[in-house]
Amino acid sequence: MPTHVPIGFKLEDLRPTQMTVGLREVEAKRRHWRDADDTERTLLLRRHVIPAVIGPKQRAYIVDHHHFARALLEEDAGPVGLYVLADLSDLPKGEFWCFLDNSHWCHAYDASGTRCDLADIPKHLSDLADDPYRSLVGALIRRGGCAKSDKPFSEFLWADHLRRRIDETLVEQDFDAAVEKALSLARAREARSLPGWCAAGGDGL
């Protein structure tokens, strides 16, 4: 059964279950952490208890909050608490990853949106690659272009949608312009099947 685990897991020991993060998002969370006082930092840690599963060799694999965990790691924030969803430590490595994959607890897609082998998922948070489109989705959510969703890896679905429609050069060289284009694309009916689509009126209907 799910259980709360006392604060005490070292960030450098946590294993990711995806291949990428948006480094702009990570940097934003780093700034938030740096600007927060001790009270606000405590609240942040309580609001973002990291969900994880326990895998082979009793290692903790986080299944969400990768951006927050990566930011805390880079800020040398110290140990964190986990919310353990399942103890799968008795499973052999191959069966463990198969279980995660079929439970939507891992996302083996690289920064180009290409499906990779489960074995290609990095072993450390510091090795997660940058996907600028994942940062673009974060900005899109903050601007109200789409809503956060409980659907697993919904932000990556949006990232892949935008990746096919916005040139990477624009994302890298003029992020604000890319956000404006993403807002327009998010209102279109073409995006209505994506989780969190919230167009109302205008060209969205």
Image (cartoon, rainbow, N blue to C red):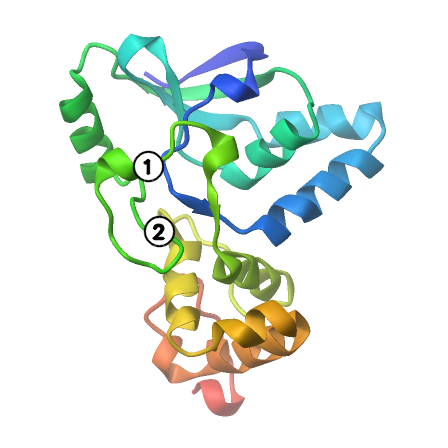
Residue 170 position, x and y percent, is 57, 76
Q: In which image quadrant can residue 8 be found?
A: top right
| Above or below: residue 172 compared with residue 155 | below
Foreground pick, 193 / 114:
114
Q: Which residue is mark 1?
A: 121
Count residues near mark 1 (Cα–Cα under 10 Å), then give few for <14, some for 14-19, many for 20+.
Answer: many
| Above or below: residue 194 compared with residue 26 | below
User: Looking at the image, which residue is at 49% across and 31% down?
Assistant: 125
| Above or below: residue 153 compared with residue 182 | above
The residue type indicated by label 2 comes to: Asp
Number of the label disc, if any, that sits on residue 171: none
User: Looking at the image, which residue is at 44% across and 46% down?
Assistant: 20
Q: Earlier in the sequence, mark 2 or mark 1?
A: 2
Residue 137 position, x and y percent, is 52, 62
The residue type indicated by label 1 comes to: Ile
Q: Which residue is mark 2?
A: 110
